[in-house]
Image (cartoon, helix red, strand yellow):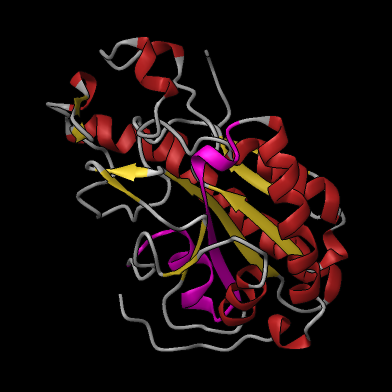
Amino acid sequence: MANMCAFEVLEGKYDSGLVLLADHAMALVPAEYGDLGLDRSVFARHIAYDIGIEALTRALAAKLSCPAVMATFSRLLIDPNRGEDDPTLIMKLSDGAIIPANHPLSPDERERRLERYHRPYHHAIDALIEKSAEATGRPPLVISLHSFTPFWKGAARPWHTGVLWDGDPRAVRPLIDALAVIEGVIVGDNEPYDGALKGDTVNRHCMEKGIAHALLEVRQDLIADSGGVALWAGRIAPILAALNADDDMHVLRRFPSRA
């Protein structure tokens, strides 16, 4: 895709007080990079994007009438959910796949990817949060959406969904509690990953600023088709609406970080 934009904004009611983010929604690569030296089939795998998250983000934004911003570029090009100084920002090897176009990588090319893709996406997040805050006179609740693989290194992951977080429990505790009462649903608390990561999206845009937030993961096999997306959007939307109605989600409050 030539001259691709680094992000897509889903317009919604900015006075809703809710903003959705999707760092790994898509697996696009600008035409000048070809397939990064990889077999095209790699871009259907989880290492290229979060399977099911684009569709889930669109469904939730529609149900909740709230704005969202999604990164369009593959994490194999550059990972928008990493700080600029993170050694995993541009991966040379991902889950057994060597990325030829990423090694060796010159400082100029690294800066080029930051300037054309990583930074514009984060500027779009800043703009969306600011626009929401201007519309309501108070900070929005921010929910970052991701998905995870059902197996990792041969081991099954038992969770259906997980909530990742660092030091701010305001949105996290009620979100975990509400998901846990759904029959048959196993919820991970900082599983399958730890949510404290310096410089990642929610650390940068929420933790450091005192904005209430949570990172919500859904297992990829559960949202891999339209039926799964509809089911999980139907489950998640009312929970987020209830969270968003809590005044405590719209107050700036800084918490100590573990990152």
Report the front residue among 257 and 182: 182
Q: Position of residue 72 (x, y in %)?
A: 55, 32
Q: Which residues are magenta?
A: 198-224
Point 37% across, 40% down: residue: 114
In the picture, measured across the screen, residue 254 lies left or right of residue 223, that is left
Can you say which quadrant of the picture contains the C terminus?
bottom left
Q: Position of residue 85 (x, y in %)?
A: 25, 55
Residue 144 to residue 187: above or below: above
Between 147 and 157, which is closer to the camera in this rendering? 157
As for residue 81 lying within the magenta part, the answer is: no
Quarter where residue 115 is shown? top left
Q: Residue at 75% of width from left, 64% of height from top? A: 18
Is residue 200 positioned above or below 203 on the image?
above
Where residue 83 sits in the image (x, y, percent)? 34, 56
Residue at image position (35%, 20%) is 42
- In the image, taking residue 89 as reference, residue 166 lies left or right, namely right
Residue 67 in view (yes/no): no
Question: In this rendering, is residue 253 above or below 129?
Answer: below
| Residue 168 visible to the viewer | yes
